[in-house]
């Protein structure tokens, strides 16, 4: 059956562009026009899902509400059944809020991180990223430097595993200083460890970045073993 509007609060009026007097009695889909912001296809009606399943439902990510004037809002939404004394579903209450600003921030961050990965992957020098001491990214040049055939040999492992024991205290101190001051760690020569256990002489520079929404350290390396 068709769900029709019976009540709206002021926020619903503002986001949809319909007043209660204008919307009352109209089909929900006419007033609450939602689409998938990525595919631009109509999104499933939360009211229909509630009526079908008889339980609280939430909208998927990337749901956009198209207001009466064409204005588009990213929304977070949930629907819950309204039941009568016999527990039969007689209606649905929709609760939704404008999350456009948060959505745009997340999308910009994701796009910047995608650009970061693309640029860094094609950078000829070895680069690794670690979060709280765990490697979360290593480009092709870093895999080659350490003798890794796949990223799994580095990613998910402690960064200190690849640092010579004589230099681990230096790495810890530099990382702590960066976290406290936000300043980049200047270039210095360190000794790192190849996966086969041999020693690598490498110039290293570190700086703080945001990676997947978390504070991280990007480490750029230059192999100087040939000088030794």
Image: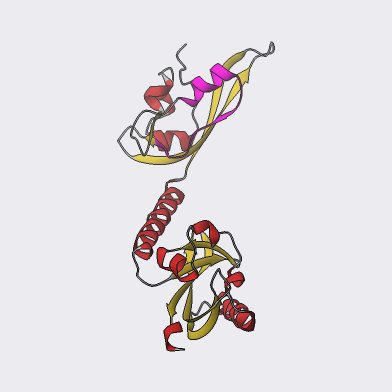
Res. 133 image quadrant: bottom right
Above-or-below relation of 33 to 196: above
Q: How is the image coloured?
A: secondary structure
Residue 162 place in picture, x, y as percent: 57, 72
Residue appearing at x 54%, y 66% in the figure: 130
Q: Residue furthest right?
A: 85
Say left or right for 153 vs 66. right
Q: Is residue 124 visible?
A: yes
Counting labels gives 0
Residue 118 place in picture, x, y as percent: 35, 59
**Residue in the foreground of this view, choosing between 92 and 173:** 173
Residue appearing at x 35%, y 34% in the figure: 66
Above-or-below relation of 151 to 174: above
Is 134 contained in the magenta span?
A: no
Residue 123 place in picture, x, y as percent: 35, 68
Residue appearing at x 54%, y 60% in the figure: 153
**Residue range corresponding to the magenta coloring:** 45-64
Res. 22 image quadrant: top left
Q: Is residue 22 visible?
A: no
**Residue in the foreground of this view, choosing between 79 and 164:** 164
Q: Residue furthest left?
A: 70
**Residue in the foreground of this view, choosing between 152 and 3:** 152
Residue 77 place in picture, x, y as percent: 51, 35
Res. 119 image quadrant: bottom left
Say left or right for 79 vs 12. right
């Amino acid at each position: 059956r068709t769900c029709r509007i019976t009540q709206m609060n002021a926020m619903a009026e503002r986001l949809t562009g319909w007043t209660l007097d204008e919307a009352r009695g109209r089909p929900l889909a006419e007033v609450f026009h939602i689409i998938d912001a990525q595919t631009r296809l109509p999104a499933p009606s939360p009211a229909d899902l509630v009526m079908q399943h008889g339980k609280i439902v939430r909208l998927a990510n990337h749901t956009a509400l198209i207001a009466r004037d064409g204005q588009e809002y990213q929304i977070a939404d949930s629907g819950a059944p309204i039941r009568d004394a016999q527990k039969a579903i007689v209606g649905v209450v929709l609760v939704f809020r404008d999350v456009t600003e948060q959505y745009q921030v997340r999308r910009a961050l994701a796009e910047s991180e995608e650009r970061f990965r693309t640029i860094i992957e094609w950078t000829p020098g070895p680069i690794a990223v670690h979060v709280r001491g765990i490697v979360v990214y290593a480009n092709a040049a870093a895999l080659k430097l350490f003798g890794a055939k796949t990223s799994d040999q580095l990613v998910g492992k402690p960064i200190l595993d690849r640092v010579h024991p004589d230099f681990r205290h230096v790495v810890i101190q530099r990382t702590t200083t960066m976290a406290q001051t936000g300043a980049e760690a200047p270039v210095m020569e360190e000794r790192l460890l190849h996966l086969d256990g041999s020693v690598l002489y490498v110039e290293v520079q570190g700086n703080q970045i945001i990676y997947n929404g978390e504070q991280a350290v990007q480490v750029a390396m230059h192999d100087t073993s040939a000088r030794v």
